[in-house]
Image (cartoon, rainbow, N blue to C red):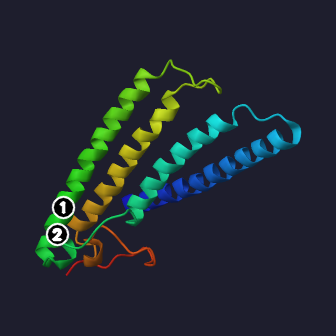
Amino acid sequence: MFIRLTQGVTRTLELSIVACLATMAALVFGNVVLRYAMNSGITLSEELSRWLFVWLTFMGAISALRQGTHLGSDTVVSRLPLAGKKFCFVVGHLLMLFVCYLLTVGSWAQVVINWDTTSAVMEVSMAYFYFCGVVLGVMGGLVLLESLWRFVTGRLPESELIGIRESEEEPVDAPAPIK
């Protein structure tokens, strides 16, 4: 059930990424056309596009973490025996969970500090801008916990012990158990 939940949330994030990108493209294109054709523009276009880009980037990081498509190097880990790969997998995930914790705490502090501060053009609380770090920290932590849970229960294939995947490889929906 937990795996289905994270898959559903990840799918929702991917659709949100598409919506952000489409909105950004429409705002920027519309602003360029208005500036050249009518010597005017959409005032909030630049600021809203910047906010959407930041949110798009953080949501993309969650999606990449879920799919194992972040940049990485497997030179050492791929040459280790199975026990070494398992050890590196657990230690790596625990370190990433710690980073997610730090990101969540730091971003939440920024949300609290900037709650009464408004953006220059949109006049919206800057807390919404910094909340993307909280979303990344929490969601990234849940993705990592899911992966650790699959490892502990023996449902994580050996191929996923190495935390990166070539871009041509398809994501694995039904992982085979570790032998």
Residue in the foreground of this view, choosing between 120 and 68: 120
Count of marks overlaid on the render: 2
Q: Quadrant of residue 122?
A: top right
Instruction: Pinpoint residue 131: horizontal percent, then vertical percent.
Output: 46, 35
Amino acid carrying label 2: it is: Lys
Residue 67 is left or right of residue 152, and the answer is right
Residue at image location 65% in from the left, 37% down from the top = 46
Q: Answer yes or no: do the residues labelled 1 and 2 have beta carbons within 8 Å?
A: yes
Around disc 1, counting alpha carbons within 10 Å, would you say few (fewer than 14), some (14 to 19), or many (20 or more)? some
Q: Which residue is mark 1?
A: 90
Picture coordinates of residue 96, whole percent (x, y): 26, 52
**Image position, residue 146 (x, y; %):** 32, 59
| Quadrant of the rendered image containing residue 38 | top right
Rendered view: 169 above or below 11 = below
Judged left or right of residue 111, residue 96 is left
SS state under label 1: helix
Residue type, mark 1 in image = Val
Give me the disc on residue 18.
none
Which quarter of the image is occupied by the C terminus?
Answer: bottom left
Q: Residue furthest right?
A: 38
Residue matched to label 2: 86
Residue 1 at least partly seen? no
In the rendered view of the protein, which quadrant contains the N terminus? bottom left
